[in-house]
Amino acid sequence: MSSEVERFQGGEVVLSRPSRGYPRPGFFTQAGQLDRQRESEHSERMRQLYRDAEFNLAKSDKKLAEFLKDLENLTRANIEAKFDANKIHRTSKLLDEDDPELRARFGVLDDDWFGLLRLLLDDLGIVNGSPS
């Protein structure tokens, strides 16, 4: 028979696993206590390493989230600046055209705007740019 099927427990066959190379010392011996103590220390070190790894991962996730937020804000500001530049370019191009009908419409709109501005300044008591 195979060496894996040699132990019996309560009438059932139990597969034996190969040891780590050396048999464990007796439970109540000094060597057994030292073995359990070292195994406990090893387990504690492994748990602490795992906690440190999780903490560092969370810290790097936080930094990544902040970086992505800053990147998104910069991208949004860049796009808004491009739209503003495009709007200014289109406006200046529109105002430079030599279309007499368009110039007449702009003149009417400007007259209306200045009329509203004069009314607003009169309501505030400002005449010729200085308070009266």
Image (cartoon, helix red, strand yellow):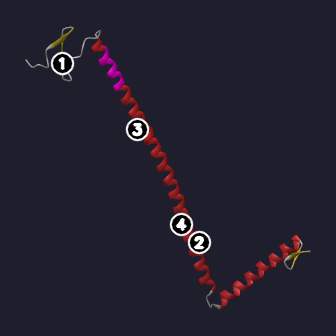
Residue 16 disc label:
1
Residue 22, placed above or below residue 57? above
Give me the C-alpha separation between circle 3 and circle 2.
Answer: 46 Å
Give me the C-alpha separation between circle 2 and circle 4.
Answer: 10 Å
Q: Residue at x 62, y 79 (%)?
A: 91
Eye-nearest disc, 4 or 3: 3
Whole-percent x, y for residue 45 in the image = 37, 29
- Labels 3 and 2: the sequence-earlier one: 3
- Labels 2 and 1: the sequence-earlier one: 1
- Labels 3 and 1: the sequence-earlier one: 1
- Judge left or right: residue 28 versus residue 114: left
The residue carrying pointer 3 sits among few (fewer than 14), some (14 to 19) or many (20 or more) residues within 10 Å by Cα, namely few
Whole-percent x, y for residue 21 in the image = 18, 23
- Labels 2 and 4: the sequence-earlier one: 4
Residue under numbered circle 3: 53
Instruction: Pick whichever, 41 or 119, lies toward us.
Output: 41
Residue under numbered circle 2: 84
Residue under numbered circle 4: 78
The local secondary structure at tag 3 comes to: helix
Name the image quarter holding residue 40.
top left
